[in-house]
Image (cartoon, grey):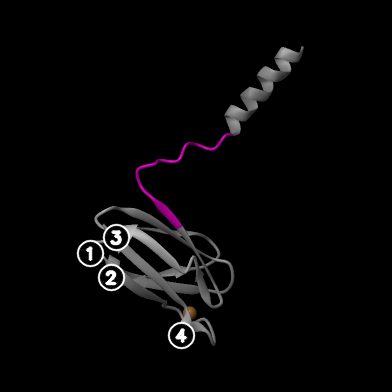
Amino acid sequence: MKIIFIALTLALIAAYAPAPVMASEPQITVYAKNFAFTPGTITLKVHQRAKLVFVSKQGTHGITIPDIGLNNIVNIGNKPTSVEVTPQRTGSFIARCAVYCGIGHGTMLLKVNVIK
Ligand SMILES: [Cu+2]
């Protein structure tokens, strides 16, 4: 009886375990709120594709990061929005909130470091 219970438990764990994450593409989640991005700094590797996931915990925001090829506004709401980027040059870049979100909008920055 005990063995059956253990076997059933293992079967349930296997059935509901999350699928393994592909290790090939780094993924960074950036949270937005009034009036900050968290983390405030992200680091990407030049010529390496990465997935950025934006989600707002408060308010509606947006972002463009032309320095890494993100030229169109990514709207950031309470559902995650994913974009893929492949930075083409190294450097330290400042991205700003692209959707007016209130009094602190002008100071809502995301620093993007692109390294070798
Ligand atoms: Cu804003």
What is the CA distance from the residue labelled 1 to the residue labelled 4? Answer: 26 Å
- Mark number, residue 81: none
Label 2 belongs to which residue?
67
Check disc 1 and give the amino acid type. Answer: Arg
Neighbourhood count class around disc 4 (C-alpha, 10 Å): few under 14, some 14–19, many 20 upward: few
Label located before the other in sequence (4 or 3): 4
Under tag 2, what secondary structure?
Answer: helix
- Circle 1 residues within 10 Å: few <14, some 14–19, many ≥20: some
Q: Is residue 25 above or below residue 108?
A: above
Q: In the picture, which quadrant includes the C terminus?
A: bottom left
* Element on which disc 3 rests: strand
Give the camera-side residue of 67 and 61. Answer: 67
Asked if the residue at tag 4 contacts the one at tag 1, i.e. Cβ–Cβ closer than 8 Å, the answer is: no
Magenta stretch contains residue 111: no
* Secondary structure of the residue carrying numbered label 4: helix
Left or right: 91, with 83 as reference point? left
Query: Would you say the beta carbon of the disc 3 residue lies within 8 angstroms of ligand 1?
Result: no
Q: CA distance from mark 4 to mark 3?
A: 27 Å
